[in-house]
Image: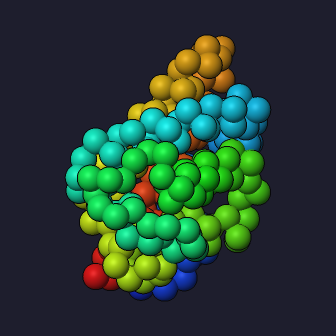
Amino acid sequence: MKRIDEARLETDLPYRFQYITEFMGLNAQDIETILGAAPLLAPLVPGLVDAIYVQLFNYDCTKRHFVPRQFGYEGAVPESLETLTLDHPQIAFRKAHLGSYLKRLVTGPYDGKMIEFLDLVGKIHTRDFGNKNIDVPLVQMNALMGFVSDALVNAILDLNLPPDAQRKALRAFNKLLWVQNDLIVRHYARH
């Protein structure tokens, strides 16, 4: 039986990442599968980003987070929830960030910087980083991650890969998204 320092899981990000990936079985072969999917999945990113934002705009509780100035955005902000449209410059800014995130997932490398990047995804959706007026509730982050997971599964299924390659891709991305979800949820446990 392997001994785990549970207190260290809360304070040492690389230690936490190692434990979670080892426990779930996210291994080097999975990372190779994820990186190997880049040529097939990267071209689908713009459509995936658009679908995610359409879904976010379907609900006031998710759309409202795009009215305040986004961290790093310097242009005009929307006047209200009702006037915010999918083609607003601030949304284009956010879409570009989401697209970069999704592309980075399939282009790696999975090193210390990637671990910090995945952890930052959770942190930036709380008041701990960026705009103090934007604090996305955990229920909305979980709903978003579920939507992203389903969209990614659908994209992989639509690739019509050979059965073994499809199985490997689905399993690898499933594990990766669970790791990402843990690195989101950990920042909510602090509030």
Q: Residue at x 28, y 41 (%)?
A: 58
Q: Is residue 129 left or right of residue 40?
A: left
Residue 51's spot in the image, x, y percent?
45, 35
Q: Is residue 163 above or below residue 95?
A: above
Q: How many marks?
A: 0
Q: Residue at x 44, y 67 (%)?
A: 77
Q: Nearer the viewer, residue 166 or 20?
A: 166
Residue 26's spot in the image, x, y percent?
59, 50
Looking at the rendering, which quadrant does residue 62 occupy? bottom left
Q: Nearer the viewer, residue 91 or 177?
A: 91
Residue 107's spot in the image, x, y percent?
74, 48
Q: Is residue 128 above or below residue 44?
A: below
Task: Report the quarter where the C terminus lies.
Answer: bottom left
Can I make out residue 36 in this image?
Answer: yes
- Colour scheme of the rendered structure: rainbow
Q: Is residue 113 left or right of residue 45?
A: right
Q: Residue at x 28, y 57 (%)?
A: 81
Q: Residue at x 52, y 74 (%)?
A: 71
Residue 174's spot in the image, x, y percent?
49, 41
Can I make out residue 120 in this image?
Answer: no
Q: Is residue 119 left or right of residue 140?
A: right
Q: Nearer the viewer, residue 113 or 133?
A: 133
